[in-house]
Image (cartoon, helix red, strand yellow):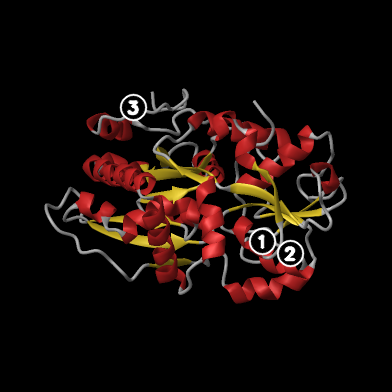
Amino acid sequence: MPATTRTTLRRGIAAAALPLLIGALASCGYGSESKNDEKKVAAEGKKLSADTVRLGYFPNLTHATALVGDQEGILQKELGGTNLVPTTFNAGPSEIEALNAGSIDIGFIGPSPSINGYVKTKGTNLRIIGGSASGGVKLVVNPAKIKTLDDLKGKRIATPQHGNTQDVAFLNWISEKGWKVDAESGKGDVSVVRTDNKVTPNAYASGAIDGAWVPEPTASKLVSDGAKVLLDESDLWPDKKFVITNIIVSQKFLKAHPDVVEAFLRGTVKTNEWINANPDKAKASANAKLKNLSGKALGAKVIDAAWPSIQFTNDPLAATLQAQADHAVKAGLLEKPELSGIYDLEPLNKVLKAAGQPEVSDAGLGVK
């Protein structure tokens, strides 16, 4: 398998990125807060077995299936008289906590918190029930300081969190280069600086970092500030595909309301179909939802550069989840996890079959 990957254990936001950024981080309000979306699509039609389904997702382009499905009312339409109640999160751990506490039922989330959440509860609370997105991660650098990949040695490169998906991918890439970095401190041949995505552009502008291995739209925000894309992580994977966003569900909710889960997945399949058939409209829809959630849309220069690097897919790309876990173990950030049973793709495959689409694989990690 080509270099890089991604993985595991999302720990709490890495304290550190540089003391001078702490004030900026606080002012951004970024962390484990969640936000309820006040704009709701009216529920119409027959109510399913649950009155509501509480959905969690991030206001990120890599969660565009949720952004667009919510904005366009596609998810609510499939749920009929069952109300969709969305809540947005800024960090994987907080969404997993909400799922564990019963505050949300279904969520869009990255592979690392999915693995961590499954392992921490010994496989008793969540299941991955579908895919959503692949790609959308880039290494961007200051072109005045870094012109080739070999120039990264001795430089300060940001990742979003200690042990998060991009952090593990970068540590793995460093290892493949034959360089040494302490996974805990980030010190070594390259300085890995764990910096919140909302702070990373400020860190780059101040010269505190020389580049970053980050997801969209942070990568394209940096490019709009003068950075250069040195590597697209997709180029390191077979078929240029790797999971960046999963759909998870509480096992309790899945058992109690299989009809709601199936209807929700019909909505995500139809949303992805609409996104892929109408990329310009979908991009505008996602941006409208981001503006609704944050009060500010992404600039055209940023979203136009970011959007094409993300693939929207129903396939959870299960083999790449296992590979990411393996890379986290290799980096010393995770003990070898038991992931058997993390997937339950039966509801999704039922939906796909009814839609005349090919079924997807759990790579041997499904419910037995």
Q: Position of residue 8 (x, y in %)?
A: 60, 41
Q: Secondary structure at mark 2?
A: helix
Select label 1 or label 2 by which is in front: 1
- Residue 68 visible in the snapshot: yes
Quadrant for the N terminus in the image: top right
Q: CA distance from mark 1 to mark 2?
A: 8 Å
Residue hosting label 1: 222
At 55% from the left edge and 54% from the top edge, which residue is drawn? 306
Is 157 on the left-hand or right-hand side of 249? right
- Disc 3 residue type? Pro
Q: CA distance from mark 1 to mark 3?
A: 38 Å
Badge 1, how many Cα within 10 Å: few under 14, some, many 20+?
many
Residue hosting label 3: 358
Badge 3, how many Cα within 10 Å: few under 14, some, many 20+?
few
Q: State the residue in front, 348 or 305.
A: 305
- Disc 1 residue type? Leu
Quadrant for the C terminus in the image: top left
Residue hosting label 2: 204
